[in-house]
Amino acid sequence: MSRPSRKVALITGAGSGIGRAAAIALSQDGFALVLAGRRKEMLDETAGLLKSDSLVVPTDVAKSDSVAALFAATKERFGRLDLLFNNAGIGAPPVPMEELTLAQWQAVLNANLTGAFLCTQSAIRMMKAQSPQGGRVINNGSISAHTPRPNSAPYTATKHAITGLTKSTALDGRPFSIACGQIDIGNAATAMTARAHEGLPQADGQVLPEPRMDLEEAARAVAYMASLPLTANVLFMTVMATTMPFVGRG
């Protein structure tokens, strides 16, 4: 059976930054969009920038009932799901590890890792059951999936764990035409990297300015991964500001 002409993508953290930019890029490629995030007003702003049909669903990905409602709304509106972009994420205060509270640690794990798991789990259920069967999951891993910044244990731990989730999803999805890949983005120009021009902590203790790249380059990379047929998959992609201090000794 041939695939429907209109594909449906669900993006978490779609109200700003990489999520919003990816939504715009996918909309330009003809995807209908489901926009998930905690702030409805920001999601509505994203929806207003799109060229294709969209559905706004305020969602807390760390809560299973909220995720269940998100996917139920997706199925009711569009009937299927072709792409999940697990993009939502938060960080903890950049303090020494011993000063972090358990609540701060758990909040990052719940949003970044449990949220991605819950959304992936729901997406797999939909993708297995729909006809034609299959779909794609893209996880936002971040450069922190490879190398930490100082005082970033919760965020770095979750992003390393996302790599394991990516590999497991790619493996377990094979029999059902479900592909999974991870994009690791370094210093895209978003609110999260706004301090880069002033200076960011380095491994040797210095605080130095870092270059950033245009946010649209990250969005184009996501759109490329999404454009592939399900017979091909980008398992891992790193897209970063060329001269950011990632490759080399710290």
Image: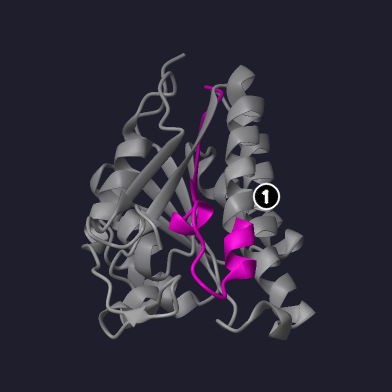
Residue that badge 1 annotates: 117
Q: Residue furthest top?
A: 1
Q: In which quarter of the image is the C terminus?
A: bottom left
- Percent position of residue 219, x then y: 30, 53
Kindly identify the residue that appears in the image at 64 percent across and 42 percent down.
165
Confirm whether residue 202 shows in the render: yes
Say if the magenta span includes residue 41.
no
Disc 1 residue type (three-letter): Phe
Query: Picture quarter containing residue 230?
Result: top left
> Which region shows up in magenta?
132-158
The picture places residue 60, in percent across and down from the top left corner, at: 63, 68
Residue at image point 67% right, 49% down: 117
- The answer to whether 136 appears left or right of 171 in the picture is left
Examine the structure image and report whether residue 148 is included in the region drawn in magenta.
yes
Q: Is residue 70 left or right of residue 227?
A: right
Image position of 106 with respect to 170: above or below: below
Give the residue drawn at x 46%, y 33%. 235
Q: Would you place residue 27 above or below residue 193 in this image? A: above
Q: Is residue 215 above or below residue 164?
A: below
Residue 201 placement: quadrant: bottom left
Position of 42 with respect to 69 (left or right) is left
Residue at 44% from the left image edge and 56% from the top image edge:
143
